[in-house]
């Protein structure tokens, strides 16, 4: 029977898009589980507020500014994160951005920006961090995707395209990393209450929801909290060696029928 060494108890983790939403919640959940965390995002002042709160509760947390649309920022983040907490054992590729726009009416520059943030930046960072994991023969890379991959949603064409690519990257890496001790996993959340989309025009958003209802991709009004998705990330990386969660999809429960939801 094959034997696998256990994960170390202290697993330094780097989380992108950590200034809010799922990234912030993931940093808090991993730190509460005893893992040192590095929070990366453009809003490094907000990341530092979160890190200070984590430290006030006894956790280990550092911040490094990260702009996943900038190659030099990605390189600097990878180096600084390791210097801050040690060799990275867990990388959570969560940074994302969504704009409203169809495939035809989204201009090339805006479309490319979406792909850069949601796919190309993740690939660049993973390529820098994964090499050390392979050398150490252990590590977890978690790609935060969306249920708009298996069930695409109209009106967010660039985002859906980029997340399709992200899951394709994860699947290829699962094959290429097999036997190295490094696990690549996808956490695929359904509707989650985050700040993504806060800057959308209200009328455009209402029209978007109408389209989703028309296509049957908005089944109920339930939303998850970011901490619930973060728990899924923790569950994935906590699986014992010798096991590999390749894909974990998490959906919100529907409101209980007949109960007042106010």
Image (spheres, helix red, strand yellow):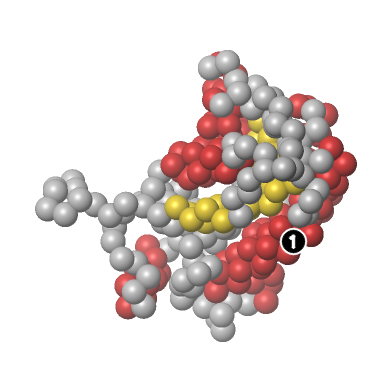
Which residue lies most toward the bottom here?
Answer: 104
Tell me if 133 is positioned left or right of 237 in this view.
Answer: right
* Residue at horizontal 69 percent and vertical 25 percent from the top: 10
Image position, residue 195 (x, y; %): 47, 49
Badge count: 1
Q: Residues within 10 Å of mark 1 (few under 14, many from 20)?
A: few
Tell me if 166 is positioned left or right of 33 in this view.
Answer: right
Above/below status of 72 relative to 45: below
Query: Quick one: 9 or 42, which is closer to the camera?
Result: 9
Above/below status of 10 relative to 128: above
Q: Is residue 199 visible?
A: no
* Residue at horizontal 37 percent and vertical 70 percent from the top: 217
Tell me if 237 is positioned left or right of 122 in this view.
Answer: left
Query: Quick one: 77 or 229, which is closer to the camera?
Result: 229
Which residue lies most toward the front here?
Answer: 1
Tell me if 180 is positioned left or right of 206 in this view.
Answer: right
- The quarter of the displayed image where residue 114 is located: bottom right
Query: Quick one: 244 or 78, which is closer to the camera?
Result: 244
* Residue at horizontal 55 percent and vertical 74 percent from the top: 157
- The quarter of the displayed image where residue 83 is located: top right
* Residue holding disc 1: 175
Above/below status of 146 relative to 229: below
Q: Is residue 197 visible?
A: yes
Image position, residue 162 (x, y; %): 63, 67
Q: Secondary structure at mark 1?
A: helix
Image position, residue 214 (x, y; %): 32, 78
- The quarter in which the N terminus is drawn is top right
Query: Quick one: 169 or 52, which is closer to the camera?
Result: 169
* Residue at horizontal 54 percent and vertical 31 percent from the top: 28
Image position, residue 126 (x, y; %): 76, 51
């Amino acid at each position: 029977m094959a034997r696998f060494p256990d994960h170390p108890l202290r697993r330094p983790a780097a989380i992108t898009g950590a200034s809010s939403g799922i990234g912030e919640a993931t940093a808090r959940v991993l730190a509460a589980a005893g893992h040192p965390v590095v929070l990366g995002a453009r809003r490094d002042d907000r990341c530092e507020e979160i890190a200070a709160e984590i430290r006030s509760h006894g956790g280990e947390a550092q911040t490094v500014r990260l702009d996943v649309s900038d190659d030099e920022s990605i390189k600097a983040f990878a180096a600084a994160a390791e210097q801050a907490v040690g060799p990275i054992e867990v990388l959570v590729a969560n940074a994302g951005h969504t704009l409203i726009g169809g495939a035809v009416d989204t201009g090339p520059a805006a479309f490319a920006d979406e792909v850069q943030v949601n796919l190309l930046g993740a690939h660049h960072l993973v390529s820098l961090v994964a090499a050390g994991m392979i050398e150490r023969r252990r590590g977890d890379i978690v790609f935060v995707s969306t249920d708009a991959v298996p069930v695409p949603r109209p009106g967010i064409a660039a985002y859906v395209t980029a997340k399709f690519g992200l899951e394709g990257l994860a699947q290829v890496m699962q094959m290429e990393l097999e036997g190295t001790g490094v696990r690549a996993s996808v956490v695929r959340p359904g509707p989650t209450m985050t700040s993504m989309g806060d800057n959308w025009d209200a009328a455009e958003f209402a029209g978007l929801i109408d389209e989703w209802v028309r296509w049957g991709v908005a089944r109920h009004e339930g939303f998850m909290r970011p901490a619930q998705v973060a728990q899924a990330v923790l569950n994935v990386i906590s699986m014992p060696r010798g096991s590999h969660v390749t894909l974990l999809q998490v959906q919100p429960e529907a409101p209980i029928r007949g109960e007042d939801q106010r």
